[in-house]
Image (cartoon, rainbow, N blue to C red):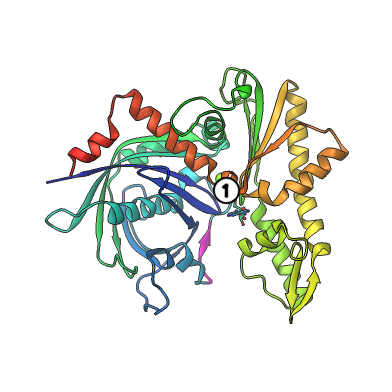
């Protein structure tokens, strides 16, 4: 029986899961929202699998071994859905496992062939990670064991194109990284594994990852290690801020900004005609008076955290701002910084801000496979 081998990296963000399959050209984005769902009626508009992921997962890594859930966009349509909350550990809840297996399941049915019984049996080399504070508490090993040592199966229920397909996973190897450190790897390694940004090497740098629900501030030492003593985080991210703005805009103008992404477009639009504006009954209305106080309030908290850490680690040379939050807070952070310490901040593109960690996990996996002498392409080919 032919079994496929696949490489997969998954950044289990509180706001969204970012994954790479097989190579760095193949990526997947799933909002991190789930809801328990037995059965449902199919709606005509659902054309693509990502519009309506509905799965049954049986896994020893789950608290309730078997769950039927809607995941991502479909789950957002149910009012009783679960988004992650920052007080729950990623290493200790069902939701990250569900998202991880869903991402792997989509890869399996889209990129491998079923066996004679119609089951997709796939061996995965998986690279994923946990936030700093969980790594600090040594959760990586436990999380790895739960995935690598467990039994996992997924069946697509009412999902376009994939209904009825079953995937059985074997996790051949699982790497559990630390989010902030992974970002450092991405900043200092090219896709082919060679070194980039050489000016970062041998310097103490800060990587501030402003996510949806949390902020992780990693200090990377001159010796390229995470400084466990001074790296820190807060349970604050940009999603709450964006939701507040959406709510206040609705209260004042009875105008619904449909999603956080739409609001991000309004905040970051290059066109000054559009930036900070909505169109109410065809009339252009500025919402800057609502946006600014919200953004600055979060930016001030972020800046305070940065200052505290910089005070503790005075030889810090540079601070990278990454994560979706860095895209949204860029202007506010720069302004606060110009009025205060003038730290050397660096920002990356919006796309890199979002994808950096998942890409880093993938690069780390490739380096690992190389080091172990596992010819990944060969393993994949001989498996067919
Ligand atoms: N270009 C973008 N694409 C997607 N989301 C964006 C973008 N720019 C800003 N955002 C916003 O950034 C937030 C998500 O950021 P990010 O993906 O870094 O969080 P996360 O990794 O899921 O969360 P966490 O790091 O807390 O686990 C969302 O609130 C989203 O609306
Ligand atoms: Mg993140």
Quarter assignment of residue 300? top right
Q: Is residue 161 above or below residue 118?
A: below
Which residue in the protein does label 1 denote?
351
Residue 222 coordinates in the image, percent (x, y): 62, 18
Question: Under 8 Å from ligand 1: the CB of mark 1?
Answer: yes
Q: Please tell me whether the stretch drawn in magenta is mainly helix, strand or loop.
A: loop
In this view of the protein, can residue 153 be seen by the observer? no
Residue 46 coordinates in the image, percent (x, y): 40, 73
Taking the image as shown, residue 345 lies to the left or right of residue 193, namely right
Q: Nearer the viewer, residue 137 or 250?
A: 250
Q: Nearer the viewer, residue 317 or 60?
A: 317
Residue at figure coordinates x 70%, y 56% from the top left: 268
In this view of the protein, can residue 122 be seen by the observer? yes
Residue 328 coordinates in the image, percent (x, y): 69, 52
Give the position of the C terminus as an image quadrant: top left
Secondary structure at badge 1 equals helix
How many C-alpha atoms fall within 10 Å of the one at disc 1: few (<14), some, or many (≥20)? few
Residue 254 coordinates in the image, percent (x, y): 73, 78
Q: Is residue 80 magenta?
A: yes
Taking the image as shown, residue 307 lies to the left or right of residue 258, namely right
Quarter assignment of residue 259? bottom right
Q: Is residue 67 magenta?
A: no
Farthest residue toward the right? Answer: 339
Q: Is residue 88 above or below residue 244?
A: above
Start and end of the magenta stretch?
79-83
Taking the image as shown, residue 128 lies to the left or right of residue 351, namely left
Residue at figure coordinates x 55%, y 31% from the top left: 181
Quarter assignment of residue 196? top right
């Amino acid at each position: 029986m032919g079994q496929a081998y696949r490489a997969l990296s998954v950044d289990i963000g509180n706001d969204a899961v970012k994954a790479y399959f097989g190579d760095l050209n193949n990526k997947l984005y799933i909002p991190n929202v789930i809801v328990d769902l037995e059965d449902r009626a199919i709606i005509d508009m659902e054309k693509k699998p990502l519009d309506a992921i509905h799965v049954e997962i049986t896994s020893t890594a789950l608290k309730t071994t078997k769950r039927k859930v809607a995941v991502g966009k479909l789950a957002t349509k149910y009012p009783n859905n679960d988004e992650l909350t920052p007080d729950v550990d990623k290493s200790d809840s069902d939701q990250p496992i569900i998202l991880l297996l869903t991402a792997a399941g989509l890869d399996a049915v889209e990129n491998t062939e079923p066996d004679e019984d119609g089951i997709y049996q796939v061996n995965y080399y998986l690279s994923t990670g946990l936030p700093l504070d969980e790594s600090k508490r040594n959760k990586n090993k436990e999380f790895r064991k739960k995935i690598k040592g467990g039994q996992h199966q997924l069946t697509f229920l009412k999902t376009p194109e994939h209904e009825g397909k079953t995937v059985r996973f074997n996790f051949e190897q699982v790497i559990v990284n630390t989010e902030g450190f992974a970002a450092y790897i991405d900043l200092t390694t090219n896709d082919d594994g060679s070194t980039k940004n050489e000016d970062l090497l041998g310097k103490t740098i800060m990587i501030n990852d402003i996510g949806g629900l949390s902020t992780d501030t990693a200090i990377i030492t001159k010796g390229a290690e995470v400084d466990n003593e001074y790296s820190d985080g807060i349970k604050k991210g940009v999603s709450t801020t964006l939701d507040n703005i959406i709510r206040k805009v609705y209260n004042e103008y009875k105008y619904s900004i449909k999603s956080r992404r739409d609001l991000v477009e309004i905040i970051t639009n290059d066109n000054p005609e559009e930036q900070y504006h909505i169109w109410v009954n065809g009339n252009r209305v500025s919402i800057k008076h609502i946006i600014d106080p919200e953004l600055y309030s979060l930016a001030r908290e972020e800046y305070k955290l940065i200052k505290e850490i910089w005070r503790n680690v005075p030889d810090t040379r540079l601070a990278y701002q990454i994560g979706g939050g860095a895209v949204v807070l860029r202007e506010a952070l720069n302004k606060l910084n110009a009025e205060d310490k003038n730290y050397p901040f660096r920002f990356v593109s919006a796309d890199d801000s979002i994808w950096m960690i998942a890409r880093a996990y993938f690069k780390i996996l490739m380096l690992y496979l190389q080091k172990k002498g596992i010819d990944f392409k060969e393993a994949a080919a001989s498996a067919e």
